[in-house]
Image (cartoon, grey):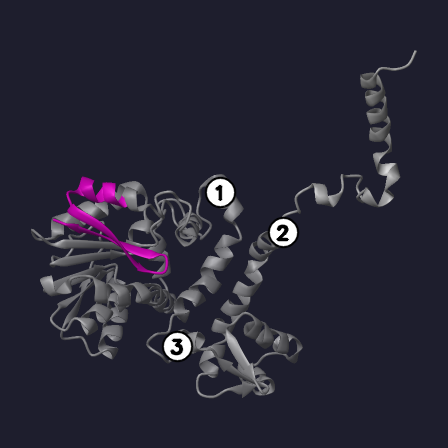
Amino acid sequence: MRPTLVDGGSAIDSRLERNKYRARPEARSWDGAPPARQKAAAPSPEGIMRLGWGFRGSKVLLSAVELDLFTELAAVPLDGATLRRRLRLHERGARDFFDALVALGMLRRCGGLYANTPETGFYLDRNKPSYIGGLLRLANATIYPNWRNLTEALRTGKPQSGVGEGEDLFDMLYADPAAAVGFAEAMTAASLPSAWALARRFPWDEYKTFIDIGAAEGALPVTVAQAQPHLSGGGFDLPRVQPIFKAYVGRHGLTDRLRFHPGDFFEDPLPTADVLVLGQILHDWNLEAKRQLLERAYAALPEQGALIVYDQMIDDERRQNAAGLLTSLSMLVATQGGFDYTVAECTDWMHEAGFCRIRHEHLSGPFSMMVGIK
């Protein structure tokens, strides 16, 4: 019997299905998959690998800061051999090290001479007041090793910095005088960009006095006092920080306007001033301690006084400020209970402490501030 049109069509389709790769061998992909033009192109792994191997570029920069390479190049460009001798480096690897810094945008090379870029010359020359290498030195010596154990911290919730249960990280950091100076320098580096922005953007003309709580060397008080000559104030920190603060303020000629207030902000009353600043302080502590610090600040302020809180605050959707999220992980590996927080969370805590007219404002890079009025 002659097949119907439908039956004949089915038979033809079946034969075509069995033979579709035999007709054109070039259409079969190496793994037997359909032709490439019939599927979407594979995504690139470049972003994954760049992030995964990013520690190499970081360590090259951190070692350069540790070696004071950028300070060495501050006066005059140098050829590779001279720079290697001055830094006391072995000839094996030195050229790759210098040229890696060129490729990473941290150095310039012209005619065989190495020189700082405008950015590294401004921020990484130890002899300039704009030096922020102290924070990178801390990263190299302390933070970088702690992050090796991030997986363990994620599994246990415990710090990897050597701080035991019930111990204070800052007691440990300030126990050794040399380490205390290094940590204070690191805090200056971390504070300067926000201090420069804060000195310009806050309405200081409405106030006469201010105190930075947890002042370290005093970078923020010095920066604000330089920009606002009508202000007086100072910094509050642990007693062992006092000589470090006085030395820094003295170098800037501001001892007549900036005073050090010794104390422990969990044990002693905070000093009174028109404006109190909690800069990169709240994220060091657990939620209970955060709320306690805000309550103490409220109690210390006069009516209509202002509290400024600044940190690398995480965006409320927790999608954009990677720096704030990574800093929160740094708190995980370094402290007993510290964590970074969103703008909405800080707003709620400040309302609970009694503050009103609370506002949020970006400062610099990943940093922003909250301002509340008593």
Q: Position of residue 224 (x, y in %)?
A: 21, 68
Residue 77 located left or right of residue 44: left
Q: Amino acid at mark 1?
A: Leu
Disc with the residue nearer the chain's start (2 vs 1): 2
Residue under numbered circle 1? 154
Disc with the residue nearer the chain's start (2 vs 3): 2
Q: Confirm whether the magenta stretch covers residue 219.
A: no
Q: Residue furthest top?
A: 1
Give the Cα separation between the discs numbered 3 and 1: 37 Å
Residue at image location 15% in from the left, 58% down from the top: 275
Q: Confirm whether the magenta stretch covers residue 349.
A: yes
Q: Residue 122 has which mark?
A: 3
Residue at image location 41% in from the left, 70% down from the top: 133
> Where 307 falls versus 127 (above or below)?
above
Q: Amino acid at mark 2?
A: Pro
> Where 156 falls versus 78 (above or below)?
above
Residue at image location 84% in from the left, 30% down from the top: 16
Q: Nearer the viewer, residue 208 or 22?
A: 22
Give the residues drawn in magenta, as a range. Answer: 346-374
